[in-house]
Image: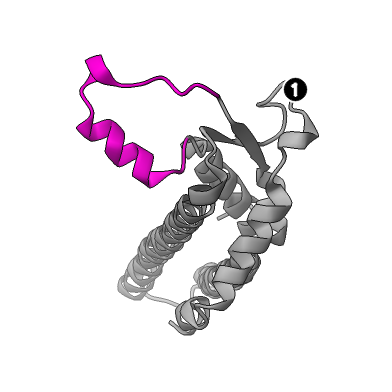
Amino acid sequence: MKKSKKTILCMLSVATIAAFTMTSCDKSSSKMDEKTPAATAKTPSELKIAFVEVDSIMSQYNFCKDYTKILQQKGNNIQKTLAGKQQQLQAAASNFQQKVQQNAYTREQAEGIQAGLQKQSNDLQVLNQRLSSEFQSETENYNKALHDSLQHYLAIYNKDKKYSMIFAKQGDNLLYADNAYNITNEVVAGLNKMYKTKPGKVATKAKK
């Protein structure tokens, strides 16, 4: 939990988009390929390609922006919860140490308090693991939803465009790409338009 939640989110999300590389989003052609024997499969007479900039998807797609805020808030809440309990434990341990030095406890009392402090420490570790796991699960759900929304939209988008391949451009993973093949603005606009037709999904998750 030491890294900022925004950094973790961005790293996971970029990896998610780049991983599936958006190769051929035409579902109809995919189904045809499955039914066509390899020996009779036809090679496209023309290779039509395009690319989408991942950074722009992350910064301009409203779904990403909304969910980023949700995850950041959850991450901050987790940090505050753990920090508060850690401070309470440290204060209790410090107070115990002072009382021991002042001989304020019998041996049995000291052992009982020390055992209680150890239990609090163990409980805090368990809580840390549970909250971290829940946050990781929520982040993975977000990445899957992002992945699914991109694939769904590109399948619709590519019915008319007929691209053979649509690449994800992130950093220097494409050494050269003519901007004429950049369809980022179209894709972002289409994603946001489709996202508007499905209100409440992210809002509902935020209330949980």
| Residue at 35% across, 45% down | 28
The N terminus, quarter of image: bottom right
**Farthest-out residue, right:** 179
- Disc 1 designates what residue? 176
| Residue at 58% across, 54% down | 9
| Residue at 46% across, 51% down | 155
Q: Is residue 1 visible?
A: yes
- Side of 93 where 50 appears, left or right: right
Mark 1 crowd level (few <14, some 14–19, many ≥20, 10 Å Cα)? few
Write down the quadrant of residue 119 in the picture: bottom left
- Side of 178 where 18 appears, left or right: left
Q: Amino acid at mark 1?
A: Tyr
Magenta-highlighted residues: 24-46
The percent position of residue 132, horizontal first and vertical second, equals 45, 59
The C terminus, quarter of image: bottom left
The percent position of residue 102, horizontal first and vertical second, equals 55, 73
Write down the quadrant of residue 183 in the picture: top right
**Farthest-out residue, top:** 39
The percent position of residue 166, horizontal first and vertical second, equals 56, 37
The percent position of residue 138, horizontal first and vertical second, equals 44, 63
